[in-house]
Amino acid sequence: MRNLGSAGLALALAVGLSACGAPSEPPAGEDATAETSLAAAPTDARPASFSQCSSCHAVQAGSNGIGPSLAGVFGAKAGHLGVAYKYSDALLASGLTWDEAALDEWLTMPSKKVPGTKMVYAGQADPAKRKELIEYLKTLK
């Protein structure tokens, strides 16, 4: 990796964070192995809508990325990984249990459901895609 300097690093971080939640492709000639290994699903049932999630979340237990692993998230309490991931104070204090209703509201717009969350995601407006994501999250053990 080349030295970007502080201005270049700040720009790279801003661009990287702005892509969070959007599907991405590696630049031509670059290997997508890091992203693929982060997002590798335990089954072939991963819906296309999950590509937005996979830019920040892994699905293997104990494999945190920018966001926490989503393995076992369905039915768990918000912040269930404890010290294994640095959640926002707002999420830890939310008292949420990740059931269908809570996930549907969260995936619609996380910052509205839990003001002060660290999750940088504008939300999924399409109810069918949210349902598809929730059904997939149920399969992650």
Image (spheres, rainbow, N blue to C red):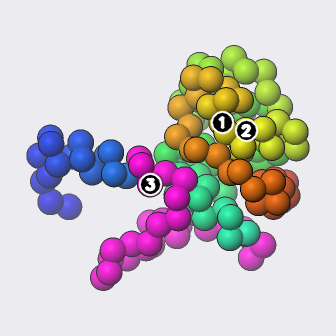
The kind of secondary structure element at disc 1 is helix
Residue at 62% across, 23% down: 115
* In this rendering, position of residue 16 left or right of residue 7: right
Q: Is residue 103 above or below residue 51?
A: above
The kind of secondary structure element at disc 3 is loop
* In this rendering, position of residue 56 left or right of residue 47: left
On residue 19, which mark appears? 3
Residue 27 sits in which quadrant?
bottom left
On residue 110, which mark appears? 1
Residue type at numbered disc 2: Trp
Which span of residues is magenta-colored? 17-46
Residue type at numbered disc 1: Pro
On-image quarter of the C terminus: bottom right
* In this rendering, position of residue 55 left or right of residue 95: left
Residue at 57% across, 23% down: 116
The kind of secondary structure element at disc 2 is helix
N-terminal of the pair, mark 3 or mark 2, is: 3
Neighbourhood count class around disc 2 (C-alpha, 10 Å): few under 14, some 14–19, many 20 upward = some
Closest to the observer, 132 or 6? 132
Residue at 65% across, 36% down: 110
On-image quarter of the N terminus: bottom left
Is any part of residue 30 visible from this angle? yes
Asked if the residues shown at circle 2 and circle 1 are in contact, with their CB atoms under 8 angstroms apart, the answer is yes
Asked if the residues shown at circle 3 and circle 1 are in contact, with their CB atoms under 8 angstroms apart, the answer is no
Does residue 9 belong to the magenta stretch? no
Residue 84 sits in which quadrant?
top right
Does residue 37 belong to the magenta stretch? yes
On residue 106, which mark appears? 2
Measured in 3D between alpha carbons, the distance from the residue under mark 3 to the one under mark 1, in whole angstroms, is 16 Å
Measured in 3D between alpha carbons, the distance from the residue under mark 3 to the one under mark 2, in whole angstroms, is 19 Å
Is any part of residue 62 visible from this angle? no
